[in-house]
Amino acid sequence: MIAKRKPTGYIATCQCGEIVGAMHLLRTLPREHINIFELWIANGCNFTPRFDKTWSARVVACKCIQPTEDDP
């Protein structure tokens, strides 16, 4: 049997496919975890757990077209 591993962090992927956020659980205050997840969810991002002790992510700006105030 393989023991389940706990995530060490998460990356956020935008709808355009770009990695727009990353959070290392040991380097982020626990009370901030929920705020970051809420922001990612509100922006329509998918988040994926990372399980390695050392991982990296290249975070870039979103390439989505931003709605204007006139858009519904």
Image (cartoon, grey):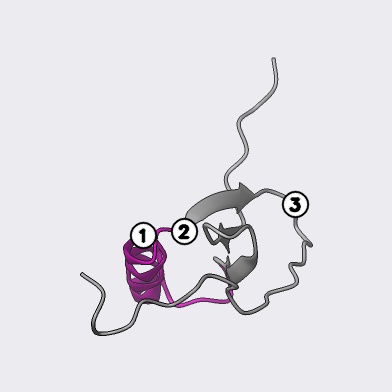
Q: Is residue 30 magenta?
A: yes
Q: Which quadrant would the N terminus be assigned to in this image?
A: top right
In this image, 52 relative to 7: left or right? Answer: right
**Magenta portion: prevailing SS class:** helix
Instruction: Tally the marks.
Output: 3
Disc 1 is placed on an element classified as: helix
Please say whether residue 28 is one of the residues in the magenta stretch. yes
> What amino acid is labelled 1 in the image?
Ile
Image quadrant assignment for residue 25? bottom right
- Residue, disc 1: 41
Residue that badge 2 annotates: 45
Nearer the camera: disc 2 or disc 3: 2
SS label for mark 2: loop
Circle 2 crowding by C-alpha within 10 Å: few under 14, some 14–19, many from 20:
many
Quadrant in the picture for residue 44 = bottom left
Q: Residues within 10 Å of mark 1 (few under 14, many from 20)?
A: some
